[in-house]
Image (cartoon, rainbow, N blue to C red):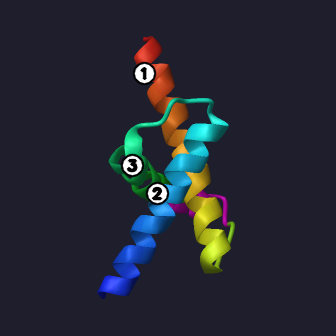
Amino acid sequence: MDINSLIIFLAIGALAGWLAGNIMKGSGFGVIGNILVGIVGAVLGGFVFSLLNIASGGLLGAIVTATVGAIILLYVISIVKKA
């Protein structure tokens, strides 16, 4: 992975984490937290989309996949916090 790919990956992660935080009405986790939520969300979203046999390509597809995964992650975190 070259430096450009890494920067794009981190930017998508940050954007996905920020979008998921706004959708889930959360206060967010800060810049680093949003990047981590977005990256983990991207992995989770890719796994879920592959199970559902949904193809998402390109930059917009990567953002949607990461955001959906981050929303799922934030939902699970909110359930665990309540318990």
Count of labels shown? 3
In the picture of the structure, the residue carrying the numbered disc 1 is: 80
SS class, disc 1: helix
Picture layout, residue 80 above or below residue 61: above
Give the label on residue 31, or none. Answer: 3
| Residue 47 is covered by the magenta coloring | yes
**Marks 3 and 1: CB-CB under 8 Å?**
no
Corner quadrant of residue 39:
bottom left
Q: Which quarter shows the N terminus?
A: bottom left
Specify whether residue 75 is in view.
Answer: yes
Mark 3: give few (<14), some (14-19) or many (20+) Cα within 10 Å.
Answer: few
Kind of residue at badge 3:
Val
Residue at 65%, 61% (x, y): give it.
64
Magenta-tinted stretch = 46-53
Pointer 3 or 2: first along the chain = 2
Residue of label 2: 14
